[in-house]
Amino acid sequence: MFPSSLLGPLLLAIVGRSSALNFTIAGGQIFTPGFAIVDAPQPDTPLGGDLLEVALDVSANGKLALPPYPDNSESRIHNITIFLYSYGTGKNFTITNGTATANNASLGDIMLSEPGSTVKHVKWTWPDCLVGNGQPSAADSDRGLYNISIRQNFRLNGADHYTIFDLPISVTNSIESNLLRPACDSLNNPLLTPEEVTISGANDVPVLFAPGDSTQVQSSGGGSAKPGQGLGSGSPPTWHTEAYWVCIAGLAAAFWL
Ligand SMILES: *[C@@H]1O[C@H](CO)[C@@H](O)[C@H](O)[C@H]1NC(C)=O
Ligand SMILES: *[C@@H]1O[C@H](CO)[C@@H](O)[C@H](O)[C@H]1NC(C)=O
Ligand SMILES: *[C@@H]1O[C@H](CO)[C@@H](O)[C@H](O)[C@H]1NC(C)=O
Ligand SMILES: *[C@@H]1O[C@H](CO)[C@@H](O)[C@H](O)[C@H]1NC(C)=O
Ligand SMILES: *[C@@H]1O[C@H](CO)[C@@H](O)[C@H](O)[C@H]1NC(C)=O
Ligand SMILES: *[C@@H]1O[C@H](CO)[C@@H](O)[C@H](O)[C@H]1NC(C)=O
């Protein structure tokens, strides 16, 4: 018998070999350290086509209202910026930094897109240097492994946070040449080292709002919940090892029990 404290997580969890990163996935949703939940793509998906599409629930599955937030709101998303970067190719493209550039080569504030919808569908045209098909064919190719880097500036129960969540994908499916593709140079930013990226004070909250996490969201006024109360209380238990990522799914019940 498993200790009963592990039974809940085990009932829900599949532990599978994958990249060296952990992901908390439940019902196909990838939970992040913040209000955003990634509906798509899944980690390590090969992508291509005309556009990169990222579907983000910005309401923590309905726990946070959509903007405009009340003035005294204790919980809100200040903004979400997204970059596509790779230490393999040295590129760091802007997907959105809040200000759209010509032809939406980089996108405006995603919180204002699709008003009324809790899921924002970020659609970003692959820039020209990613054109190709299959694995990178030459050493100087810009195709290959990337992270979709989702940066959330938000307030949770009166406390401001900034978190960075990197979702790995591979740019290896076919991307056809098209004169409308933006120039990579127009979207590229300096690539910082991991040490430079981790600014002090960032990432001070764990993955939030996954099933079992009891974090309450206070919306306005000075309620009784203390900032940070309940944070991550349902975060994944310590039996997750680095070489595994965690996939929470009902299926596992059959596997484990
Ligand atoms: C995002 O919000 C933070 C906190 O309010 C602010 O400092 C930062 O300038 C904002 N960034 C963008 C791109 O709007
Ligand atoms: C993706 O991000 C992780 C850490 O967040 C890093 O270790 C890895 O090198 C990055 N992958 C690429 C292709 O840059
Ligand atoms: C970007 O797309 C939005 C929504 O489709 C549109 O309203 C806006 O005018 C576009 N902006 C630019 C700079 O092309
Ligand atoms: C946003 O990103 C675009 C494309 O990389 C860049 O040209 C622009 O200067 C950036 N704006 C801000 C405010 O960082
Ligand atoms: C990518 O560029 C953005 C904007 O300059 C920066 O904030 C971010 O830290 C960069 N990411 C990496 C991995 O260097
Ligand atoms: C994976 O998650 C466990 C438990 O949450 C944590 O201790 C470990 O540092 C994580 N590993 C990586 C590579 O993020």
Image (cartoon, rainbow, N blue to C red):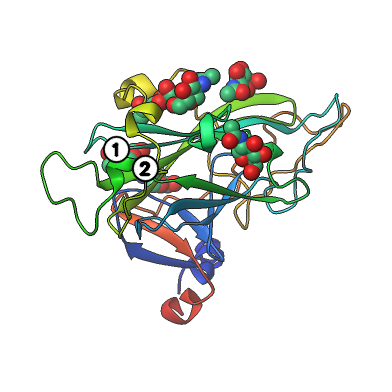
Q: Is residue 12 left or right of residue 115?
A: left
Name the quadrant where ligand 3 sits. top right
Mark 2 and mark 1: Cα distance apart in space: 6 Å
The residue at label 1 has a CB less than 8 Å from ligand 2: yes
Disc 2 is placed on an element classified as strand
Which residue of the protein is positioned furthest toward the left in this rendering? Answer: 139
For the point 31% across and 52% down, which residue is it?
170
For the point 44% across and 19% down, which residue is it?
199
> Count of labels shown?
2
Residue 111 vs 185, above or below: the answer is: below
The percent coordinates of residue 38 (x first, y second) are: 54, 52
| Residue under pointer 1 | 86
The percent coordinates of residue 27 (x first, y second) are: 56, 66
| Residue under pointer 2 | 147
Q: Is residue 93 left or right of residue 134?
A: right
The residue at label 2 has a CB less than 8 Å from ligand 2: yes
Disc 1 is placed on an element classified as loop
Q: Nearer the viewer, residue 81 or 113?
A: 113
* Contact, mark 2 vs mark 1 (Cβ under 8 Å): yes
Question: What amino acid is at disc 1?
Answer: Ser
The percent coordinates of residue 169 (x first, y second) are: 35, 51
Q: Residues within 10 Å of mark 1 (few under 14, many from 20)?
A: many
Q: Is residue 71 left or right of residue 15?
A: right
Question: What amino acid is at disc 2?
Answer: Asn
Residue 32 showing in the rendered view: yes
